[in-house]
C-alpha cells in the first residue's frame, strides 16, 4: 500500500539547503512564465533566487576564514609551546633566586598563591560492594 502522505524533506545543513534552492531556482527559471512558483507572492523566487549565489559565496568565504583560522591557531600554538618553556624556566630560576621571598615573583607578573593546598580526596572503591 502506497503512502498517501509522503514527507518531502528539506535539509537542515546550510550547504545542502543552498544546493536545493539552486536546483529549484534553476528549474523555475527554465520554466519561465509556466513555472507554478510564479504564484508565490511573499518570498518570491524573483527576489530570493539571486540571493542564493550571494549566500553560497559568503559560505565559501566563511569556510576559507575557518581554514585560515585553524592554520593561524596551529602557528600560534607552536610559538606558545616555546614561550611556555621560557616562562617555566624563568619561574624556576626566579624561585631559586627568591627562595625565601617567593611573593616577590609578583613583580615579574606571576600570580603567587601561598595558600595551603587542599587535601586530596580519597576515592572509595565501591566495586566490591
Image: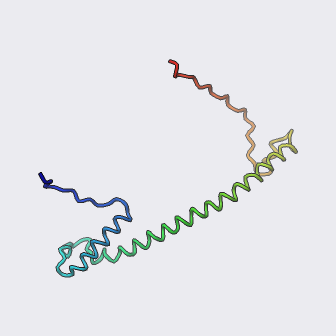
Viewer-closest of 40 and 75: 75
In the figure, 4 relative to 128: above or below? below
In the figure, 104 relative to 23: above or below? above
* Residue 56 image position (x, y, % from top left): 40, 71
Does residue 4 appear left or right of residue 29 in this picture? left
Q: Which image quadrant for residue 77?
A: bottom right
Question: What residue is drawn where x is 53% and y is 67%?
Answer: 65
* Residue 91 image position (x, y, % from top left): 79, 47
Viewer-closest of 45 and 116: 45
Report the colour scheme.
rainbow
Count of labels in the image: 0
Question: What residue is drawn where x is 15% and y is 53%?
Answer: 3
In the figure, 3 relative to 70: above or below? above
Does residue 104 appear left or right of residue 35 in this picture? right
Q: Hey, which residue is sitting farthest top in the picture?
A: 129
* Residue 98 image position (x, y, % from top left): 86, 43
Question: What residue is drawn where x is 28% and y is 76%?
Answer: 26
* Residue 47 image position (x, y, % from top left): 30, 76
Question: What residue is drawn where x is 31% and y is 75%?
Answer: 49
In the figure, 66 relative to 39: above or below? above
Does residue 125 appear left or right of residue 41 in this picture? right
Viewer-closest of 40 and 21: 21
Does residue 99 appear left or right of residue 125 in this picture? right
Q: Which image quadrant for residue 74?
A: bottom right
Viewer-closest of 110 and 89: 89
Q: Hey, which residue is sitting farthest front in the picture?
A: 1
Amino acid at each position: 500500500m502506497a503512502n498517501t502522505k509522503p514527507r518531502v524533506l528539506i535539509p537542515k545543513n546550510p550547504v545542502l539547503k543552498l544546493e536545493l534552492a539552486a536546483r529549484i531556482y534553476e528549474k523555475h527559471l527554465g520554466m519561465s512564465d509556466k513555472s507554478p512558483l510564479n504564484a508565490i507572492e511573499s518570498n518570491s523566487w524573483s527576489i530570493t533566487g539571486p540571493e542564493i549565489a550571494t549566500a553560497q559565496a559568503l559560505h565559501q568565504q566563511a569556510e576559507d576564514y575557518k581554514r585560515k583560522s585553524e592554520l593561524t591557531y596551529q602557528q600560534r600554538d607552536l610559538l606558545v609551546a616555546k614561550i611556555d618553556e621560557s616562562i617555566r624556566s624563568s619561574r624556576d630560576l626566579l624561585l631559586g633566586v627568591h627562595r625565601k621571598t617567593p611573593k616577590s615573583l609578583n613583580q615579574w607578573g606571576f600570580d603567587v598563591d601561598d595558600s595551603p593546598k587542599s587535601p586530596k580526596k580519597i576515592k572509595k572503591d565501591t566495586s566490591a560492594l
